[in-house]
Image (cartoon, coloured by chain):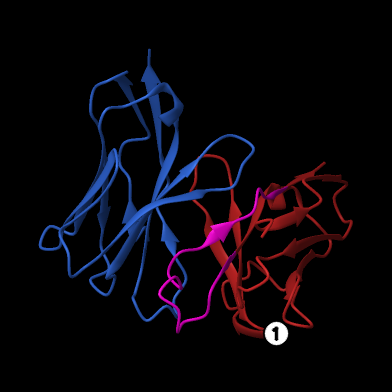
Amino acid sequence: DQQVKQNSPSLSVQEGRISILNCDYTNSMFDYFLWYKKYPAEGPTFLISISSIKDKNEDGRFTVFLNKSAKHLSLHIVPSQPGDSAVYFCAARTYSGNTPLVFGKGTRLSVIA
Amino acid sequence: DTGVSQNPRHKITKRGQNVTFRCDPISEHNRLYWYRQTLGQGPEFLTYFQNEAQLEKSRLLSDRFSAERPKGSFSTLEIQRTEQGDSAMYLCASSPGQESSGANVLTFGAGSRLTVL
């Protein structure tokens, strides 16, 4: 039973345009969400997070939006750069910190120059 | 701070052999996690430690899998009598303790890739 779902396995975007990666979750107990980026032969690297008390968090070119009623979050990358090409994982946990991070299957982003 | 270190980076073994992976977390992190990632999937939680205490191990895939963190620093993940289905990337991560504002963010190592022939 996938509690965190990334329904798009891949996405291609032109350099300079916006990349939007989507994530849905089913567990209403989740209240902290993270995005990780993974390059080949490396471990996942933390990118940005959001608590359920917010609906938006921004860090430079990266913005995460959270819609709790829809149990949906999205990661926006503007402008997209070729170096952003990687696999992006959405992850969630309960804020108590006693539960492990649950990951989606990932979305492979390709930014085309 | 040299990050999370995992060894070996790649292990090829024959079915039925035992393998052990080592993880050295960030020194000031007292939580250590093991995940497994197979092709096309996200990281799958296996077990975690707070200092030397193993707080969750029910997700270990079978009784052939075991993990230790004897002195609350480095950790080992052992797989006994390996099977071809054990072929995967084994990821270690660490984080500060629950009392820290950074407790929710895991820092991952580069992983140890296991190939079982």
Question: How would you rate the neighbour count of disc 1 (Cα within 10 Å): few for under 14, some for 14-19, many for 20 or more?
Answer: some
Residue at image coords 74%, 78%: B69
Location of residue A113 with respect to B10 vertically, above or below = above
Does B108 appear in magenta? yes
The tint chain A carries is blue
State which chain disc 1 sits on. B
Q: Which portion, as a residue range, is magenta?
A: B94-112
Image quadrant containing the N terminus of chain A: bottom left
Task: In this rendered view, identify the residue nearer to me: B18 or B10.
Answer: B10
**Rendered location of residue B93, percent (x, y):** 60, 62
**Rendered location of residue A22, percent (x, y):** 25, 43
Element type at marker 1?
loop
Task: In this rendered view, identify the residue nearer to me: B107 or B117.
Answer: B107
Task: In this rendered view, identify the residue nearer to me: B16 or A92.
Answer: A92
Q: Which chain is red?
A: B
The secondary structure that dominates the magenta segment is loop
Q: Is residue B56 left or right of residue A34?
A: right
Q: Which residue is label 1 attached to?
A: B52
Quadrant in the rendering for residue A80: top left
Residue at image coords 27%, 75%: A29
Q: Is residue A61 left or right of residue A97?
A: left
**Rendered location of residue A2, percent (x, y):** 37, 57
